[in-house]
Structures are given as structure tokens and as C-alpha cells.
Image (cartoon, grey):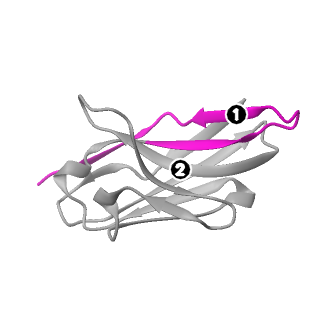
Amino acid sequence: QVQFVESGGGLVQPGGSLRLSCAASGSIFSIAVMAWYRQAPGKQRELVASVTPRGTTEYADAVKGRFSISGDIAKNTVYLQMNSLKPEDTAVYYCNARGATPSLRPFDSWGQGTQVTVSS
């Protein structure tokens, strides 16, 4: 079982910044990718950004140039720096990790989510 500690969400004005943090622990042998997803009310969960152990990143078009994902996958940690926030970025943000357990079973696990609200 994989557990997550997420932090950094909150209320921010349009144009402001927030930094989300996620640390995974538990039955982890290796991680293939860590990512942030978000889900706004009435909408489907969507990928925001992802990063691999080699540092390959992927971003949703809506956040390119404003958000930056980074982390130390070897330490099962990932961050999401969010700048120039817009009201449409308001959502619950979820940390996700995919990898293998010590018994080499694959896992695809989620954090509990952290609320980000962008409003004046």
C-alpha cells in the first residue's frame, strides 16, 4: 500500500502563486512516473503535469508556461510550482504515482487531494 502526504493548497488571488508538495511512502520498489491531476466541480479529472525519474516532463496545454513540475523521484517526492494562477485553475489537485511494489506488482495510487481556489 502506498501513502501520500500532500500539502500547499489554499486560496490565492488571480495572478498569484502556490507550490504543491507530495511525498509518497509505503510499499514502493520503484516509481515510473509521478504526476499531478486536478478535478474541478462537474468536470472529469485531468492530467496537469507529470515527471519521470529521467526528468521527462509533460504538461497540459492549459498550464504550459505557468506551471512547473519537479521532484526527486528517488525520494518519491514531487512538487508543482503554479504561477500566474487563474480562476479556472480552481480544483482539487491530486498527486499520483505509478510504479512497482517490492514484490514487483504494479501500483497506480492516488493522494487524498488538496484544494486550490483562485479567487479575488
The answer to whether 101 is drawn above or below residue 59 in the figure is above
* Helix, strand or loop under label 2: strand
Residue range corresponding to the magenta coloring:
94-120
The answer to whether 16 is drawn above or below residue 115 in the figure is below
Look at 70% across and 33% down and name the residue there: 107
* In the image: residue 105, left or right of residue 69: right
Residue 60: where, in percent of width, then height?
37, 55
2 or 1: tag closer to the N-terminus: 2
Task: Rate crowding at label 2 as few (under 14), some (14 to 19) or many (20 or more) other CA atoms within 10 Å.
Answer: many
* Helix, strand or loop under label 1: strand
Number of labelled discs?
2
Q: Residue furthest right?
A: 103
Q: Is residue 1 visible?
A: yes
Residue 106: where, in percent of width, then height?
74, 34
Mark 1, residue position: 107
Mark 2, residue position: 35
Magenta stretch mostly in which secondary structure? strand
Residue 66: where, in percent of width, then height?
32, 68
Q: Is residue 118 visible?
A: no
The answer to whether 43 is drawn above or below residue 11 in the figure is above
Task: Rate crowding at label 1 as few (under 14), some (14 to 19) or many (20 or more) other CA atoms within 10 Å.
Answer: some
Compute the Cα span from label 2 to label 1: 14 Å
- Magenta span includes 98: yes
Look at 63% across and 56% down and name the residue there: 77
Residue type at mark 1 is: Phe
Residue type at mark 2 is: Ala
Look at 61% across and 34% down and name the residue there: 109
Q: Residue furthest left?
A: 120
